[in-house]
Amino acid sequence: MRVPVGWLRSYCDPGLSVQELADTLTMAGLKMERIHHTGVGDVSAFLVGRVLESERHPNADRLTVCEVDVGRGEPQTIVCGAPNVAAGQTVAVALPGAVMPDGTTLGEAKLRGVRSSGMILAEDEVGIGEDHKGIMVLPDGLPVGGPLAEHLPIADHVIEIEITPNRPDAMGVYGVARDLHAATGTPLADDPTAADATPTGGDAADDHISIEIDPEICLRFTARVFEDVKIGPSPLWLKQRLMAAGQRPIMNVVDITNYVMLTCSQPLHAFDLERVRGGRIEVRRAREGETMVTLDGVERRFSSETALVCDADGPSGIAGIMGGQISEVSEETTRVLMEAATWVGPNIMRTSKALGLRTEASARFEKQLHPELAMAGQRLAARLMVELCGARMVPGTVDVYPRPAERRVVPLRYARMEKLLGERIDPETARAILERLGFERVGREAAAAERAPAAADRAGAAQEADPAAERWRVPPWRDSDVQREADLIEEVARIHGLDKLPTTLPARRQAVGRLTRSQRLRRRLEDLLRDRAFNECVSYSFTSPAAIQRLRLGDVPLLRLENPLSEDQSVMRPLLLPGLLDAARHNAAHGRPNVRLFESAHVYRPSEPLDAAPSADPGGRLPALERHHLAVLLTEAAPGGWRSERRPADFYAARAVLEAVLEVAGVDWVAEEGGRPFLHPGRAASIVARESERKLGWLGEVHPLVAGEWDVPGPVAGFELDVEAVLEVTAGREDVYRDVTSFPAVLQDIAVVVPEGVPAAEVEEAVRAGGGDLLAGVEVFDLYRGEQAGEGNKSLALRLEFRAPDRTLTDEEVARRREAIENDLGAIGGRLRA
Amino acid sequence: MPDLDQLRSEAESAIGAAGSAAELEELRVRYLGRKSELTAALRSIGELPPEQRGPVGKQANEVRRALEALLERRTAELEAGELDRRLAEDRIDVTMPGDPPLPPGHLHLVSQIRRRMEDIFVGLGFSVVEGPEIEYEYYNFTALNHPAEHPARAPQDTFYFAERVLLRTHTSPMQVRAMELQEPPIYIVVPGRVYRPDTPDATHVPMFHQLEGLAIDEDITLADLQGCLLQFARQMFGETTEVRLRPGYFPFTEPSVEVDVSCFRCGGTGYEGAARCGTCKGEGWIEILGSGMVDPNVLDYVAGKGYDNERVQGFAWGMGIERIAMLVHQVPDLRMLFENDLRLLEQFGAGP
């Protein structure tokens, strides 16, 4: 909303600078977005002048050379191109050096050989209109040489305000002035919509027009009739206000409708009554597919949601949004039907969205105006019609208002206000604020009679029982926003000034801040990865069906958006890998093929059928299955340096990272061969918790074809863990003291020869089985293939740690265990190598 | 019998002048070896008259001990000198990079800021809870007092999977879910991803992060909200930061306030030198979040869980984590945060 400061000050002028005005409004809830300057620069270069002589330019037919008295001794010679300039006129003059509205500086110029020292001004040249047909001829008698700004609004500031959806009243300058009045206490001019025009003539409005409405879509429809309307341009003051507020002046009748809307928020529509066919107006829903050409020349097609204003022959306007061309006011118009209606806000909002047509009118109606405002708009419009268009107002208003709205009454307890704000505002101060905002205090009895049903809830009952509660009647322009006690408290608080609020902290008697075990574990794992040279990524949670196909996961059930921004972001990712591959591709394309990346985020799977979503309270249920995953992707195991070779990523590089992660998480686990469709089939494993056999994720090298499809130079390795599964398998686990110092351990290295196909984990299992509870640790530390192991065999070197908590082990005890281990190895085709 | 005094002084000066271990060994053999004069002298003590044997023996032994000690000292000195020489020759270029050159990794800027926020609010007595990103319309809108026709519900502003199932547009649905699970008092913050169908530009992306706050107790006031957020702002932006509440509007708070912080770049003056401050655009204040007292209608949706809006009250806020991150670290374009470009990632998040 653009609020011209001159206009605002005409209603309430607290003597503040423009910046202070803007700050005051901001702190009252009308946030200044920016301050614009409109019109000319320094006004001192603009004067009232008088044309003493005018002669045709010797070298140009269309130019006139004028001698103009600007009250500075010698008259100025000014070359003027306007057809209407003549000696004897009082005119507006800009002197050389003047800064024009477009920012250019007026210089002295030679026009076809004649030096021109200044400019005689047309209204567009000072930004108060768009007319450039001729110069402005000012009333005679203005003091020659006097400042022009005293007579014409040639420079102004505009405060642009961000309007929140609850404040349709502030979409009118008088509404803004009311907040300014409330905030500063400076007197407020009388409501410009209060006084009405005087009708004349013996006829009545309903002689000229009949009106029918559908009360489901129209709360009130008022119409007045004006005759003998003289169409013409609006006066300069009105044009300037419209221009500054961002509206183009068009002609007086149209300008009046816009001016009323910009004053008090109520949009109006003027019909050429001659062109309202059948002298009848009907408000109805559109028929499906019905069309009409709107004022902007566009043919529009409607659904049955659309409310139309029709005459006897068909639609003539979209209710509350835009009129049609059919009954548009024109230069020839003499009879005007002025409409001020009240529409159903949500309906206007839906229609305007559906049509993609948002107008000044719809922006106000969608916030739900109160029906009383319709007549306020009619009154101001009527006075201007009479005053500016010389119109005769036909007596009477056709007012179709089937269910007149009651004025709302809202209770207020000062104790409650203090409890909510944490600040005591003295009741006298609070009452004065509410009164300045237009609220009226009413007695208990009146309140009981007027009580709005919305307040009859539990809080309402408590308020009713409180004898200290006051009752306040809400002004119609705030009806959609102020309906409950909390709303009234907000009114008092915002005007009293939130800057006066004390700064305190909650008592927090029972509150303790903490992170959950899950959050602490995630932080720990993320820190571990960070400290191992991994960079954390944040990728979009959605991916493309094509990416899922590239991962060969075509059969995985997916959650698909109904309204994605693009096909590339149309499904929720069931694993984190595609985001990391995208990141690897992006970095490879930007010269960084060697990456170590991780992401920690949700993945998504459908759980219940989506069409079964409850229409009421779902009672805490979740609509889909979300799990928190941690995924790692690397193309480099170790960077090359001046003393060491770069090591590319591979399965074991990824596994080393996973080992560290699961060690920190406290998971005892094994890798089970076999993996996922997107992994290298020979270098892929499932991560499985040892005891519960719970699957925790995957580990492996990305299939070279998959990596290739992402343009990521291989080899690419990684893993993905279900962090919630990790939390579940480690729930309740605590580290408990083991005595490892009282008695020494016996360390032994063994070499085990097994057939090539036997995995190390199986050897380890056999060793553990044979070692029994005296075997405290097993670690594979070398792998050998060659002559000594024999064809088709491999030799694994293992370090064994034997210990007992209560004694020093004897050689015999350890030897017995080694025998047992040898036996168990035999069962898997293995033997100890000497 | 040699002159022991002379022998001693001769040996001492020879040992003192020796420049290598080999020379010292030679001197040891010469003066203390089996064929040395001193050894011969000690051996021949028995040949002396009995009254001389004691004093001479004593003197010879003294000389022997003194020379042994001197030899030992000189040996140590020479060894130390030799080590010094060797080490001095073993010099390296200390300005070459470490090996292997493994740099620290980085948390994502959003994670780093999120953790800082979480830690600040944990310190203020808030617990961190998280919730689903795929939500029911009920939790995202209805129970947050958005009327049925509220424009935010439209598919232009919200991603849908089906009727009534959507991607949460804010972290606020967890207000209701948390209150369903826990009776008052409740003090929580909710970090997480949120989604809106905005075409990407410098200030819009379809996915971003918020941190929600909710405090409900018997006597939580708007003044308490100001205090909490002042504490937050000072820890986040600097100890001299001020907080300003401005009237605002949200369907699920009443009164509603917008919260500004004094610009931490220009100190709230609006200017950096003669130039307008680029962070606050010359305003001296930066809007960081929307907030307010929880609307009584929201509490009504969980009245059955002990949230009687005549008995308990409180505040809530929602702030954008990216917005704070961009402000604090002067990142110019929101889209950069989701490209995962190492050139950006490596600038942030190596520290705490």
Image (cartoon, coloured by chain):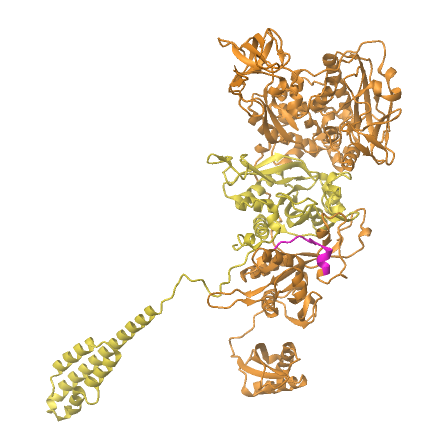
The percent coordinates of residue A336 (x first, y second) are 80, 17
Give the colour in which the image draws chain A: orange
- Which of the 4 image quarters holds residue A534? bottom right
Residue in the picture at 49% in, 38% down: B267
> Is residue B47 rendered to the left or right of residue A495?
left
- The answer to whether residue A82 is above or below residue A281 is above
> Is residue B284 rendered to the left or right of residue A702?
left
Q: Is residue A449 visible?
A: no
Residue in the picture at 55% in, 52% down: B344
Q: How many marks?
A: 0
Give the colour in which the image draws chain B: yellow
- The answer to whether residue A40 is above or below residue A707 is above
The percent coordinates of residue B136 (x first, y second) are 76, 48
- Which of the 4 image quarters holds residue A231? top right
- Residue toward you, A664 or B53: A664
Which image quarter holds the N terminus of chain A? top right
Residue in the picture at 70% in, 16% down: A233
Residue A201 sits inside the magenta stretch: no
Which image quarter holds the C terminus of chain A? bottom right
> Is residue A771 rendered to the left or right of residue B40?
right
Q: Magenta segment range? A: A537-549
Q: Residue furthest front?
A: A59
- Residue toward you, A76 or A527: A76
The percent coordinates of residue A720 (x first, y second) are 65, 63
Residue A540 sits inside the magenta stretch: yes
The percent coordinates of residue A642 (x first, y second) are 46, 66
Q: Is residue A36 visible?
A: yes
